[in-house]
Structure formats: structure tokens, C-alpha cells
Image: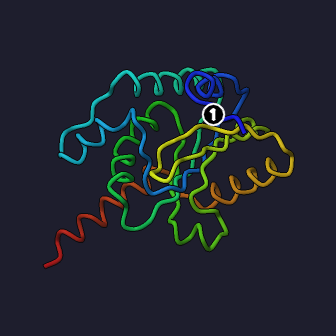
Amino acid sequence: MGLLRGKDFDAQFTGFDHTAWRLETREVYNVEEEAEDFARFLAGEPPRIDDYSRAWYDMIQAAVAAGKRFARVRVVPNPLTDYLRFEAEACQLNVAAGEDIRYLDAGRARELGLPRNVDFWLFDSIRIAQLHFDEDNRPLGAEIIRDPVRVVEANRLRDVAWHYAIPFHTWWAAQKGANEQRRERP
């Protein structure tokens, strides 16, 4: 199994015709390009937009302007891990760039039969980029899958997750409200 990395993987995001959709189910991602920003977040420092992030947001904006769609569902536990809190803070920038991101409680996802620790991008409903990680949640690369049986299953998982997931802004407002209530309790 050859895994795509770097520019070969990045080409998947400019080589689709209409939809790039992702399912995220991990509680932690050890992405090298995010390490400094994650450390800043843990130290209580404000987020910054670096070249890595700017390139991602610019790509989303260009795709959306061309009539394409970027979307994802994040399956998250309650309470959130530090990494998922960091990711949620940054999510506002993805959404502002034009990506439709939704959240689904991990308990509900299990009830619905969604897999754990399975992450993939689904391009144009016909091609899967199955993401592989090492034991420390560092990305290893993506396996491109076109097998019709697996593609149909990925589309089913997308449809189930999307149906039950909550749009980011609605979910984020509820998270902030729950955090405020916890602080107000004696």
C-alpha cells in the first residue's frame, strides 16, 4: 500500500470536481505543522495565521468561489481533549473561508455505528483518501481507495454523520454556554 504524502496528497484538494468531505474521529492529531500553534494555545496565547494555515484557507476560498464544496464532520467526546479545544478555536477560520464543519458527539456516533479512529476524505463521492496514523497519532499519509464497495460504505458513513451532526456555530455556542455554567457553579 503506497501512501500519499506532501505535494502528492495536497494535489487531491485541487483535483476534485465538486466535493471534498472529511470524517474525523480521533481525539488527538499530532500534526507537525500545528505543533507551535498548539503549544501557543495551551499557553493561553492568541492564535496566529501562519503560511501553512493561510495556504489552507486560501485553497478553501478558491474552491468555494469555483462552486466546489468543502465539508467535514468531527466526532468529539465530552469533555473535549485539549487538542479538540484547540481545533475548535481554529475552526472559526475554516468556516469563514467557506468550509461547512459540523460536530457530532462521540456517544451518539457509537450509537449510530460510526467507526472510531477512522479518518478519511471522500472526494466527489467516488474516491477515498483513507488517512493512516502511527501509534502517536502522527499522520503517515493517505491511501487512495476506489473500490466500489468501500466507496459506497464511505458515502453511507458520510450521510449518517452529516444527518446527525450539528453545524459548528450552533455547537460552539452550546459549548461556550456549558463552560460558562460550569464556572458559575459554587
Front in this rendered view, residue 182 or 47? 47
Q: Mark 1 points at which residue?
A: 69
Residue 81, by quadrant, is bottom left
**Outermost right residue:** 148
Front in this rendered view, residue 81 or 65? 81
**SS state under label 1:** strand
Q: Which residue is drawn at 23% across and 64% down?
A: 180
Residue 116: x and y in percent read: 58, 62
Drawn side of residue 20 relative to residue 125, left or right:
left
Question: Eyeballing the image, is 45 above or below 152?
Answer: above
Question: Which class describes the residues within 10 Å of circle 1: few (<14), some (14-19), or many (20+)?
Answer: many
Question: Eyeballing the image, is 144 above or below 9?
Answer: below
Question: The C terminus lies in which quarter of the figure?
Answer: bottom left
Residue 54, by quadrant, is top left
**Outermost bottom residue:** 186
Residue 34, by quadrant, is top left
Say how the picture is coloured.
rainbow
Residue 47: x and y in percent read: 26, 36
Residue 16: x and y in percent read: 71, 27
Drawn side of residue 141 relative to residue 168, left or right:
right
Front in this rendered view, residue 123 or 185? 123
Question: The N terminus lies in which quarter of the figure?
Answer: top right
Q: Residue at x 55, y 51 (%)?
A: 24
Question: Eyeballing the image, is 89 above or below 113?
Answer: above
Task: Give the tally of numbered discs.
Answer: 1
Q: Which residue is drawn at 58% across and 25% down?
A: 10
Q: Residue at x 41, y 45 (%)?
A: 30
Amino acid type of the residue tagged 1 in the rendering: Arg
**Outermost left residue:** 186
